[in-house]
Amino acid sequence: MALDVESLARRVHVADGAWSTILAARCPGEARRTEMLALTQPQATAGLIEQYLAAGAELITTHTFGVTPGNLKRWEVQSELAEVIAGICAVFRRQVPGKRAALLGDIGPSGKILAVREAPEAELAAMYRAQAAALAAGGVDAILLETFSELAEILLALRAVREVTALPVIASMSFDSGPQRTRTIMGAEAGQCAAALEEAGAEVIGCNCGAGIGSILPAVVAMRAATRRALWVKPNAGLPELEEGRAVYRTTPEEYAAHVPTLIDAGANVIGGCCGVGPEHIRRVSEVVRKWAGRRSGGSLR
Ligand SMILES: [Zn+2]
């Protein structure tokens, strides 16, 4: 069943935290391809789904961010893209209760820059169509396009998704550049991106990843000023620091949750987390959301 985006816009909801960075810390042997854990060690993925639901997450993202034809080749996976996505979706669909939480089919950026023609547009569009079709077949309630830096690429992805499914689309970009962190690394400005994504028909618009929850407010304010659509906010637990060759995120659950009231006041409708944000961060976020936004009424998400 499709996500009820109008219900999403009426109050503040809690989403899940990170997948790759949390699973990489738990399963270091698979750190390079944590998406495949859903198939090779399903209990690791299922356990984290359980923890996010228990922490109060009402929106759960399938761990399919990096499942692209190029990555499957790099990961030496023989199975087809559709088969891998179907297997990951099955683990998530089994764990995520239909009435209490919505399941979002996650698609990340290609890693190619359209502006310098690193890949033909037709090739990328075909990849997004294949990913979205497989996620829709896997029973997700909406498609999530996240961590995009190039406006042209997320608009291309949005058009491609629309060609294969009528599910609502959440379009989220990463703003980690400029003096106020309101620009993507490609220079696209948050308000302009929000306006362009609304114009292109994205049902939910937002920002994720980036430079940490402490610096995401200006991008949220700029997006809120440019769109009335439900606003999705999933920052990182700070900027990563290298420790013995691995990235660590230092913002504690308490520090993370302390930013949530300001983000709600700025107009965020969904608050979750990206890199370095784990179940304990989400539990603290849920407590704050219940306290600060509990008086706003809303119905079921599906
Ligand atoms: Zn991230």
Image (cartoon, rainbow, N blue to C red):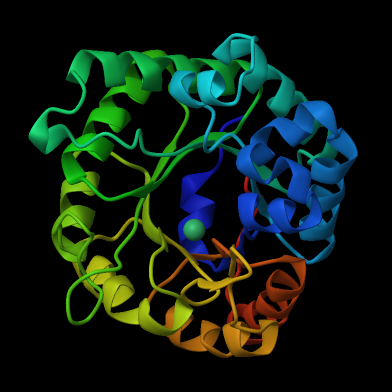
83 up-or-down from 1: above or below: above
Q: In the image, is 66 to the left or to the right of 193?
A: right
Q: Position of residue 227 (x, y in %)?
A: 24, 60
Give the position of the N terminus as an image quadrant. Answer: top right
Q: Is residue 282 visible?
A: yes
Residue 201 lies in what quarter of the image? top left
Residue 297 lies in what quarter of the image? bottom right
Give the position of the C terminus as an image quadrant. Answer: top right
Q: Is residue 266 visible?
A: no
Q: Position of residue 280 (x, y in %)?
A: 76, 73
Q: In the image, is 142 to the left or to the right of 191?
A: right
Q: Nearer the viewer, residue 136 or 214?
A: 214
At x 38%, y 22%, the residue is 128
Q: Nearer the viewer, residue 240 or 136?
A: 240
Q: Position of residue 248 (x, y in %)?
A: 60, 71
At x 76%, y 65%, the residue is 56
188 up-or-down from 94: above or below: below
100 up-or-down from 245: above or below: above
Q: Nearer the viewer, residue 24 or 163?
A: 24
How many numbered discs, if any?
0
Q: In the image, is 285 to the left or to the right of 114?
A: right
Q: Residue furthest front?
A: 244
Q: Position of residue 181 (x, y in %)?
A: 25, 75
